[in-house]
Amino acid sequence: MKLGFIGTGNMASAIMGGIIKNNVIPAEEIIGADLFAPGRERAQKEYGINVTADNKEVASKAETIILSVKPQFYASVIADIKDVVTDNQIIITIAPGKTLAWLEEQFGKEVKIVRTMPNTPAMVGEGMTAVCPNEHLTEDEIAYVKSLLESFSRAEIVPERLMDVVTAVSGSSPAYVFMLIEAMADAAVSGGMPRKQAYQFAAQAVLGSAEMVLDTGKHPGELKDMVCSPAGTTIEAVRTLEELGFRSSIIEAMKVCEEMSRSL
């Protein structure tokens, strides 16, 4: 097997879905382990991958292993598989707070490890993933890992000291954006727009604005100024947001998220 998953939940599904859809690795060369029978059965039915209830089977068969379980289960999962993992395999992690040093200590030997932090927009092929390999991977192996990740997201190499910042700025931030869309839609409904239509208008405005930042390369402040006509509706809305602490509330929330990530 070229690729193995330990855990077949939402993030694992997003990753394997992107990899299979983009013909990076065929489904028959992917294996997923999950102790939760309905979870592995869903992955098998939806993606056509091989499944098992045995983590060791994945660890012994897969060239690359993605640990897609919650952070609190990492120690027990690694303890379960470390004796069958070899120095030829690549281990990809997606857990906030679990440093390369901690991971290497759990394995108790030299292992090729790549810390990553993807986010849930990977489920629609629009994710953002930070990539942080340890010193045991070759340049070709790092390029291979990036090619896997780029099947469902943009991927950028970052130093490990920024991984907790990544958790705040992209890993957790979809929740902030969903709250913004919900609030915008609530206001539109208050103004008389049907709920379904309100979500469409709000979500498309956020999507289009994000594309403008990425495609134009302009500073977000410059793009904001383009919308704000003198004595117009937008600048009055911006003034109210500033008065209510919109930007500072986002910054403070992200700093709390970053600190929480460090403490895991």
Image (spheres, helix red, strand yellow):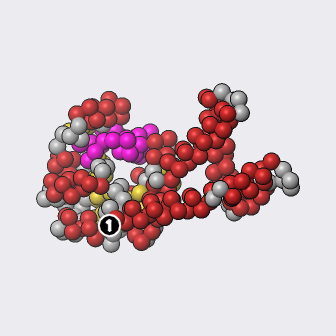
The region drawn magenta spans 6-33
Left/right of residue 212 with respect to residue 15 in the rendered view = right
Residue type, label 1: Thr
Tell me what residue is drawn at x 63 percent, y 56 percent: 246
- Residue lying furthest front: 244
Tell me what residue is drawn at x 77 percent, y 58 percent: 225
Tell me what residue is drawn at x 54 percent, y 44 percent: 178
Q: Nearer the viewer, residue 112 or 192?
A: 192
Q: Count of labels shown? A: 1
- Is-magenta flag for residue 11? yes
Residue 69 point in image, percent of width and height: 29, 49
- Residue lying furthest left: 83
Q: Nearer the viewer, residue 104 or 148?
A: 104
Residue 241 point in image, percent of width and height: 68, 54
Residue at the disc numbered 1: 99
Q: Nearer the viewer, residue 40 or 135?
A: 40
Quarter of image, res 242: bottom right
User: Where is the C terminus found, in terms of image quarters?
Assistant: bottom left
Residue 128, visible in the rendered structure: no
- Which type of secondary structure does the marked residue at label 1 adopt? loop
Residue 175, visible in the rendered structure: yes
Quarter of image, res 116: bottom left
Task: Reply above or below: 78 against 183.
Answer: below
